[in-house]
Every structure is written in C-alpha cells, then in structure tokens.
Image (spheres, rainbow, N blue to C red):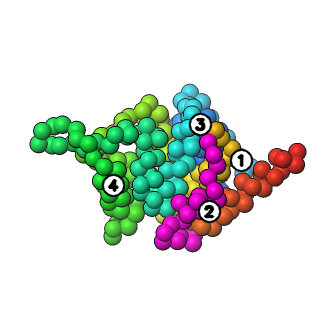
Amino acid sequence: KKVDELEPEQQLDFMSKAIECAGAQILQSGFVHADPHAGNIMYEDGDLVYLDFGLVSRVEDRLMEAFASGIIHLIGGNWEAFAQDFVDMDLVPSDFGKLNHATGVWEECSIDQFCKAVREMFNTGRGGEQLTQFGDLVIGVQKLADEYKFCCPAYTIILVRTFATLEGLAALVDENFNMYEACLPYAIRRGLAVSNRPAPSIGRLLGSAVGPPPKPHVLVHVIGSVSYTHLRAHETRGN
C-alpha cells in the first residue's frame, strides 16, 4: 500500500522506516535511491518495498563523513565546524569568498564572516527560531550563494531531491517533523564508524552534537546511537 492508504499508526511506522532507510543509504551504505516519492515506496506487512531504481546515486566515503559531520555540527550549533563541513562537502572553496556587488568581484572573506552569515541564515525560522525543514535550508543556502562563493557538485541535485521528497512525505504524517534530528542517529554512527581517518573521541562527538547549550532530547539520540554502535562493534568482534 501507499502511505496515503495506511492507517495513522502505520503511516508513522512507514515514515520512521523510510527515514531510517534514507539515513542508512546516504550516511552508511553510500547507495541511494534518489526518487523516493509516494509511488516508489510501498508498505507491506510492516516492511518497506522500494520500486523503480531508474534514478540512483552513489556517495563517496569522504562525502558520507562530511554529511554526517555537518548534521552533527548543525544541530549542535558549532558554526565554525559546520563551515568546514561545507568545504569538505565541496559546497564552498577553501578560500572563502564574498561578492563585492559594487565591483562585481569576489573578495576574500574570513571563516568568521562566513560562519556569521550561516548562523544568521539558519536562525531565520518563525520567531527567530532555527530552521527545521530541509527545504528551508536549501532556500537559505541559495540566498547565501548570492553573497558568498559556492560550488555546485554533481551530487547536490540528486541528494537535495531525495531529502526534499522524503520531507514532503513526512509532512503528511507529522507537521513538526525535523529532518536533521531524524538523521542524527545515523550521523553519529557514521562519525564513530571505522574509516581512514582517526575516530573522534566520544566526548568530542557528544560536545559537537549536544551544545552548548545542552539539548536533552538530542542527547538521548546521541547516547542511543553511541550505545548501538559499540554494541554492534562488540558483536562483530565476537563473531
């Protein structure tokens, strides 16, 4: 059945599993179904069935790590680290630039200037609150690109489509859905996963994700993700 044909309880289960699948694809496996609209995901006996693999994408390990890091730093409000995540995601060049509208020339700007602009953009939600919708973040970044030098790597169109489509589905079920927090557990697991770079300390990872100021509901997600990751590692070593 399609999501709009399900009972409310089943719809919640559908979206929970759809977000879990998306998080696992983009942050763990690197193989992404890039067209997850309502006609391409069915629900059968508590399982999701994906259809139509005509539009898929692969994500490099370094980009998966950058995405995961970006989600963690975005939620934690670690703007300088988030700015570096933009560089690691190939969204901005390492030499930050700002457009001088009077001359039409790109001029060098500091990471602090860029961080301030990103922070102000992200805090443009209702009543000055943080943006919670991925679509709003995309619009905010588009506005930033009028002032600051941005790049447009090939993956952006497909992955933006993937997240925006899922967010639209989620809004049918939960109007308060927050894509960033939904993806946080998978970002933490990716952050703790074995890779070619040194693993961050758990303390540093917790600090990046939770604050300051501390966010108790985020801390619950983080602790659960850390526990899950270490349990899986223990099981793997046991086998």
Residue 233 on image: x %, y %: 77, 50
SS state under label 1: strand
Q: Which residues are magenta?
A: 197-217
Instruction: Indicate which label's residue lies in the foreground, 2 or 3.
Output: 2
Q: Give whichever of discs 3 and 4 has the lower sequence position.
A: 3
Kindly report the distance in space between the C-alpha atoms of the residues bearing marks 4 and 2: 25 Å
Residue on which disc 1 sits: 47
**Image quadrant of residue 210?**
bottom right
Residue drawn at x 57%, y 53% as measured from the top left: 183
Asked whether the residues under the numbered discs 3 and 4 touch, taking CB atoms below 8 Å apart as contact, a structural biologist would say no
Does 183 lie within the magenta span?
no
Q: Is residue 226 above or below residue 145?
A: below
Q: Disc number at residue 203? A: 2
Q: Amino acid at mark 3?
A: Asp
Furthest-right residue in this view: 239
Q: Give whichever of discs 1 and 2 has the lower sequence position.
A: 1
Q: Quadrant of the C terminus?
A: top right
Instruction: Indicate which label's residue lies in the foreground, 1 or 3.
Output: 3
Q: Disc number at residue 112? A: 4
Residue drawn at x 84%, y 47% as measured from the top left: 237
Kindly report the distance in space between the C-alpha atoms of the residues bearing marks 2 and 3: 23 Å
Residue 66 on image: x %, y %: 52, 44
